[in-house]
Image (spheres, helix red, strand yellow):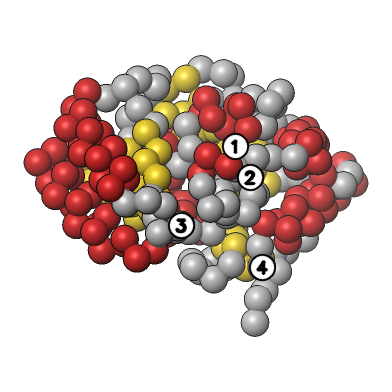
Amino acid sequence: MIQTPPSPSLEWCLFLDVDGTLIDFTDSPLDTCADAELTALLGDVAERLGGALALVSGRSIEYLDALFAPLRLPAAGLHGVERRKASGALHGASFVDSQLDRARAALKALVSANPGTILEDKGRTLAVHFRMAPQTEDAVREAVRELATPLGSNYHIQGGNMMLEIKPSGFTKAAAIKAFMQEPPFCGRKPVFVGDDLTDKDGLKAVEDQGGISVAVGDRVRGQYQLDDAAAVRNWLQAIAALHDSHRE
């Protein structure tokens, strides 16, 4: 039985995954779009929480800014490889990692040979999606593993929903959340993280370890509380946007 999250509070700070959490998955990651209603809702929630809302996503910050324009929210992109503080200061500036060039070329050839697979080149990470070609999963896994091995311990494979990604080691959504929690306007608040995928497991645990609230979307991961899908997340966010100062706890 799905347990809905507790009544929202203005004392929360909120960390939100994007794909599968705020927006339903699409066949191609390139087809993802956010409607004006969702963008306005995120702006309202951020305002109600005094700016203490951050996107924590596998997407790049540049992509998130385009997706939710004109909003420029605090954000952790590429699973924490890059992060923009509420002040606007950016850590882990985006660039094309030349150490991934061999893998980049090989994965381009892989997707060319396997129709339905997609390479998402994010500069510092490489993700192969096989949602439209699930029969290629074994081949994709083998190829990604073979390409990641020569890169050594500085890189690792991040699994996700019908995708595999080669990314730098040492960066996680959990670490990004912990960094935000040391900074205004997040510090001193109760952290709440909402995510749906294997890439969100460490973020869910991170807020639990800090006495916060973990909310899982769907059934791929478990949190203290569950929401059915992206539509349910939106309804829940609307309750936060409707909070008034008299609800402070």
Displayed quadrant of residue 88: top right
As displayed, is residue 10 above or below residue 101? below
- In depth, the one of 11 and 226 nearer the eye is 226
Dot in front, 1 or 4: 4
Cα separation between marks 1 and 4: 21 Å
Residue annotated with mark 4: 228
Identify the disc placed on residue 14.
Answer: 2
Residue at the (59%, 67%) spot, across then down: 218
Residue type beneath disc 1: Ala
Q: Which residue is mark 1?
A: 54
Task: Report, in whole angstroms, how far the alpha carbon at label 3 lies from the one at label 1.
Answer: 30 Å
Label for residue 139? none
Q: CA distance from mark 4 to mark 3?
A: 23 Å
- CA separation in Å, label 1 and label 2: 6 Å
Label 4 element class? loop
Residue under the point 18% across and 44% down: 148
Q: Nearer the viewer, mark 3 or mark 1?
A: 3
Label 1 element class = strand
